[in-house]
């Protein structure tokens, strides 16, 4: 098994790679479409902005490569947000895997922007309920609930913290920074075929 980590300009490449190596996974950080297509699993990490990540993917001709993947794909944070149709961040057209839009966290007395720290993901399926745990979040934008929502998190508003559609999984939190809960989540992803 090999995991391709797509280098789309995010700052957390090495921490994602380290977390996967702790799970005894062979990894490669790459922008090569052939390596990505041949990997058993693909990770789209993300620290940055939706517009920048999508511009990078377009410049590397990776948009169609990602859309056509049939192996398990995990989008982390911005990597999840670009799997939606559209992001308000820089008015960005995204990959369109998941239904819906990504919006800026609203300015409200109970909301600190960005959301930084630990929060609980509540899964809507009994098959995934064992993954319900506290994870580390760092986000200023959020995905609204849709038919692809697999878990939600309450942060004065209800946001999608995990989305699943076919072979694509997105998590708003950072499993690579989420200690044992993150390891369990990554093991779930790595166990998918």
Image (tube, rainbow, N blue to C red):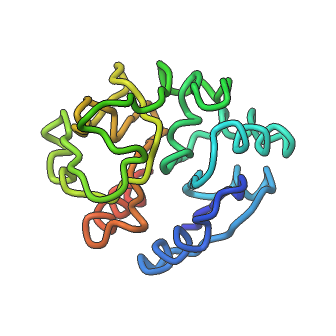
Q: Does residue 147 appear left or right of residue 2 in this picture?
A: left
Q: Does residue 47 appear left or right of residue 158 in this picture?
A: right
Quadrant in which residue 183 is drawn: bottom left
| Residue drawn at x 42%, y 60% as measured from the top left | 190
Quarter of the picture holding the N terminus: bottom right
| Residue drawn at x 79%, y 45% as measured from the top left | 56
| Residue drawn at x 62%, y 51% as measured from the top left | 48
User: Can I make out residue 42 in this image?
Assistant: no
127, 121: nearer the viewer: 121
Quadrant in which residue 156 is drawn: top left
Quadrant in which residue 7 is drawn: bottom right
- Residue 94: percent from the left, percent from the top? 64, 28
> Is residue 150 depicted above or below 96 in this figure?
below
- Residue 13: percent from the left, percent from the top? 61, 66
User: Can I make out residue 174 in this image?
Assistant: yes
> Is residue 100 depicted above or below 17 in this figure?
above
> Is residue 34 depicted above or below 112 in this figure?
below
| Residue drawn at x 15%, y 53% as measured from the top left | 130
- Residue 22: percent from the left, percent from the top? 43, 80
Q: Does residue 85 appear left or right of residue 99 in this picture?
A: right
- Residue 141: percent from the left, percent from the top? 47, 36
């Amino acid at each position: 098994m090999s995991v391709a980590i797509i280098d789309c300009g995010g700052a957390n490449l090495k921490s994602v790679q380290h977390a996967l190596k702790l799970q005894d996974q062979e990894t490669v950080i790459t922008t090569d479409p052939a390596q990505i297509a041949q990997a058993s699993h693909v990770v789209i990490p993300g620290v940055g902005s939706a517009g920048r990540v999508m511009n990078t993917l377009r410049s590397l001709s990776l948009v169609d490569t990602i859309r056509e993947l049939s192996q398990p794909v995990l989008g982390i944070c911005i990597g999840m947000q670009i799997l939606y149709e559209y992001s308000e961040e820089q008015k960005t057209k995204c990959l369109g895997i998941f239904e819906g839009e990504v919006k800026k966290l609203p300015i409200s007395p109970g909301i600190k922007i960005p959301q930084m720290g630990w929060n609980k993901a509540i899964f809507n399926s009994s098959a995934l309920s064992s993954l319900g745990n506290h994870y580390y979040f760092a986000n200023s934008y959020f995905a609204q609930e849709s038919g692809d929502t697999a878990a939600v998190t309450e942060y004065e508003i209800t946001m999608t913290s995990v989305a699943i559609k076919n072979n694509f999984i997105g998590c708003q939190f950072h499993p690579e920074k989420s200690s044992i809960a993150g390891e369990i989540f990554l093991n779930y992803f790595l166990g998918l075929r």
